[in-house]
Image: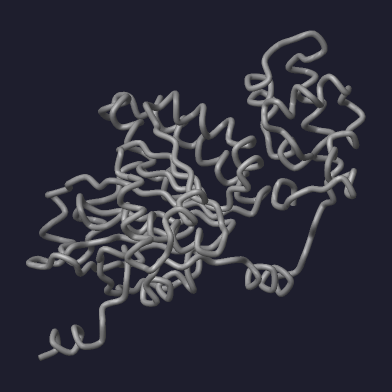
Amino acid sequence: MGGGRGMSEEEPFEEEPLKKLKSLTPELIKTLKDKGYFTIESLAVEAPNSLFETVGARPGFTLDKAREIVHEARDSLQIVIMDALQLYEIEKKRKRYTTGSKALDELLGGGIPEEEMTEFTGEYEVGKSEVCMTVAILAAEKGVNSWFLDSEGGITGKRLAEMAEARGLDPKKILPHIYQGAVYGTEHLLFLIENAHKPIKDKNIKIIIIDSFVSPFRAEYPGRELLYQRQPLINRCQRRLINYMRAYKLAVITTEQVMAKPEAAPLYHVRPEVLNPPVGGHIVSHAVSHRVYLQKPAGETSKRLATLVASNYMPRETREFKITKAGVEDVPPEEKKEEKK
């Protein structure tokens, strides 16, 4: 689909796909491309009012014109109806990105999948950011570009370089494939996500990582009395991310904080997601394809437990991994044997 591969002068239709839309003038095409809309798909997945807000009112462009453009873009795309076997074959061909641990990859059905949203949640220091950085490092080794939207300052060039060196990789070759954008608040996160077409296209981004996603919303919209304002904004961000995944064949990874729920302890002590549930509520849960709950066992420094507490198609399971200078790795067999003694 649009935005997913490089373009050349020998492919004029790929170079200027927006010329296919009769509702667009050359001036509007230039304006849309300046705002990050390079493909018909990027317009088709847009809401008319969002397109109007992004482009802004100007001669020849009104809300009605935005509706016309979006509707024509949607009408121009072929309606694809397939049987479940065809769908299954397409799903099997989707790329997956390794976490650095075979055990964790197996938990997710083979790694972090494209066109799906994977969430890592858990308490402080359980390794959420470490997983994300390891995914980025190992993807970069294969020439795949990642983009971090960092709301907590947990992503550092120094740590990424350390991981690369520990794996025998040259940071000067790896780090240029990893992009970072600091998030300063809710409005800034909204701006970055709603205008992500251009960096996705310009930098050929294939993995978007938001660490952490709900944190800015919690800080600016605290308490139950502001939920009615907060949740629609979260939903707006997630809907845009889902559209990007589909239009550009991206993998999206988010991290989430958890909150204490002590009243649940007597009844559900074996389920960590009930004792300390992820923040964000039902809206976040519905958009996530896979939710992985990370824990740090008592007395351990490097070992972690990962439990797949929710998934569209994988069973609930718990796997063990460890965090080292190289990031996420499997627990060596000899260490597992010692645990059994």
Q: Residue at x 44, y 69 (%)?
A: 108
On the image, the x and y values in percent for residue 302 come to 18, 66
Left or right: 206, with 26 as reference point:
left
On the image, the x and y values in percent for residue 150 come to 38, 39
Q: Residue at x 55, y 43 (%)?
A: 241
| Tally of numbered tags | 0
Q: Residue at x 7, y 67 (%)?
A: 299
Tell me if I can see residue 228 in this picture: no
In front of the other: 117 or 211 = 211
For residue 310, what is the image quadrant?
Answer: bottom left
Specify the color scheme.
one colour
Tell me if I can see residue 224 in this picture: yes
Left or right: 110, with 90 as reference point:
left
Left or right: 93, with 312 as reference point:
right
For residue 188, what is the image quadrant?
Answer: top left
Give the position of the C terminus as an image quadrant.
Answer: bottom left
Residue 219 drawn above or below residue 140: above
In front of the other: 77 or 277 = 77
Check the image and name the residue furthest to the left: 299
Q: Residue at x 16, y 54 (%)?
A: 264
On the image, the x and y values in percent for residue 295 come to 22, 62
On the image, the x and y values in percent for residue 61 come to 78, 15
In front of the other: 3 or 59 = 3
Residue 58 drawn above or below residue 250: above
Residue 43 drawn above or below residue 311: above
